[in-house]
Image: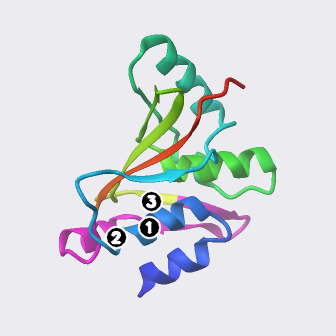
Amino acid sequence: MLGLAIGVIGYPIYPEVAREHLMMYRPFSNKPKIIESDFFRGSTVVENAIIKAKNSGKPYRLAWPSSAYKLSFRPDKYKEARIALALNGGYVRIQDNKVIASINIKYPQNSFAPLIAIKGLGTIGVEEGLFWVLQKVGWLYSGKVEWVTKFKQT
């Protein structure tokens, strides 16, 4: 129940992550779930990875520190947090004039995702290990998602 509540309540703030989380309540097929969206474009991390993937012809790993997850009222930092939460640990590649950001949706055994820092109180976040346990007992499923958009250089 908590996981569904987090998915629904989190949707207005972190829609892509909420969508990925809610996908985990149904088994994945052998093929990745494809989502047409360019939400991940504009991120410094992603744009640098796109350049490296294009130049090398190989997928390039996406990585952010967990501090990038924190909610911010600055539009650039907020966007980066949304993208980091949805794609951290994934890969970006260029294929058939498309940018494809692939992520294996699964929770780590031990990881705290800091979301909101409140002065004087601390940080509100999610201990992802709780959801890892739900994966292990078969209540949540893991699988691959690919976010796809046309390749346009920024």
Asked if the magenta segment contains residue 123, the reply would be yes
Q: Distance between the residues labelled 1 and 2?
A: 10 Å
Q: Which residue is pictured at 57% across the width and 19% down the height?
A: 51
Q: In this view, does 69 lie above or below 99?
A: below
* 24 with respect to 123 (left or right): left
Determine whether the residue tagged by mark 1 lies in a helix, strand or loop: helix
Q: Residue 140 carries which label?
A: none
Q: In this view, does 33 lie above or below 9?
A: above
Contact? badges 1 and 2 (CB < 8 Å)? yes
* 70 with respect to 130 (left or right): right
| Most distant residue in the top direction | 55
Q: How far apart are marks 3 and 1 (CA)?
A: 16 Å
* Residue under pointer 3: 112
* Residue under pointer 1: 21
Q: x, y percentage for residue 17?
A: 52, 61
Q: x, y percentage for residue 124?
A: 59, 69
Q: Which mark is residue 131?
A: 2
Range drawn in magenta:
114-141
The kind of residue on which mark 1 rests is His
Q: Check disc 3: other Cα within 10 Å, few if <14, some if 14-19, many if 20+.
A: some
